[in-house]
Amino acid sequence: MNAAPPLVLTFAANDPSGGGGVSADLLTLAALGCHALPVITALTVQDSAGLQEFQPVDPEWLHDQARYVLEDAEVDAIKVGMVGSVEGLTVLAEIAADYPDVPLILDPVMPRGHGDDMADDEYIAALRELLVPHSLIVTPNQHEARLLASDDADEQEDLPLDAAANRIIQLGCEYVLITGAQAQTPKINNALFSQNGRMRTDSWDRLPGRFHGAGATLSSAIAGALANGVELGQAVRDAQEYTWQTLKHAFRPGMGQMLPDRMFWARNGGDDNAKD
């Protein structure tokens, strides 16, 4: 009998566009030699242009999906994306507490319907209190980092990223990777933080276009690298390299944003492994 590949339990919403959510997790983890165990957290109505509506899965269904798999197989990492409800976050926190030795990678996706400015304050508070403390690493963008770090809207706008990361770590996680795609800078600067402060900043050429699913790809790639036994600092670096390559080879299937090509290496001309 062949040995099983690394197993990654992933919690994510179904994205019919295939850009983010469970599709991003499945493709990314497969590309990195892992076997994904997908637990659906929500159903969404969305396309490559954006999210219109979402419906969280019943908490009991969420619980049972995960528990049956966890009782059947020994997982190497857990990745959490959009959950969609406070009740769902409560279920995930209970599961994470029962598996403290399994690294949990949290992409703190804050669900927003079409036209909404931000996620519900109760949902953000639940992320802080319930899931961040169980996470090895949290991977927010700059906006999400400030929302997690402060519930004061006036403070959020100008909160320095180092201060935001420190506050998130004080909530109980070990590392924070704040991504810089939102900043209006020539390069994208992603900063990795630990309890000792900023560990390093990785800079990447900014690619033209708008992308859907980059954050899900990055967090899944970190989970995949960790599941393969890579040390965290190198896992973060490798995941960024992989994600940058998926964006370099991105395609536009519809009228909206570009989607990362997680299988770029399997296509003609996709065998380059470094930045140009």
Image: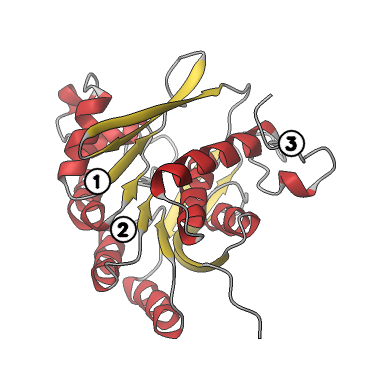
Residue 122 locus on image (x, y percent): 20, 49
- Residue at 16% x, 22% y is 154
Q: Amino acid at mark 1?
A: Ile
Q: Residues within 10 Å of mark 1 (few under 14, many from 20)?
A: many
Q: Residue 74: horizontal and vertical position, in percent?
A: 43, 77
Q: How is the image coloured?
A: secondary structure
Q: Which residue is mark 2?
A: 85
- Residue 91 vertical position relative to residue 252 in the rendered view, above or below: below
| Callout 3 crowding tier (Cα within 10 Å): few <14, some 14–19, many ≥20 | few
Q: Position of residue 169 (x, y in %)?
A: 21, 42
What's the residue at 58%, 75% (across, down)? 4
Q: Earlier in the sequence, mark 1 or mark 3?
A: 1
Give the distance between the C-alpha atoms of the residues marked 1 and 3, in whole angstroms: 39 Å
Residue at image point 57% right, 21% down: 205
Three-letter code, disc 2: Ser
- Is residue 119 visible in the rendered image? The answer is no
Is the C-beta separation of discs 1 and 2 under 8 Å? no
Q: Which residue is mark 3?
A: 272
Amino acid type, residue under disc 3 in the picture: Asp
Q: Residue at x 63, y 40 (%)?
A: 260
Give whichever of 133, 158 is nearer the camera: 133
Q: Nearer the viewer, mark 1 or mark 3?
A: 3
The count of marks equals: 3
Left or right? Give the position of 176 relative to 23: left
- Cα separation, mark 2 vs mark 3, equals 40 Å
Please give the residue where the numbered disc 1 appears in the rendered image.
Answer: 124
Front in this rendered view, residue 29 or 11: 29
User: In the structure shown, which secondary structural element does the residue marked by tag 2 occupy?
Assistant: loop
Q: Nearer the viewer, mark 1 or mark 2?
A: 1
Q: Nearer the viewer, mark 2 or mark 3?
A: 3
Residue nearest the observer in this picture, 36 or 130: 36
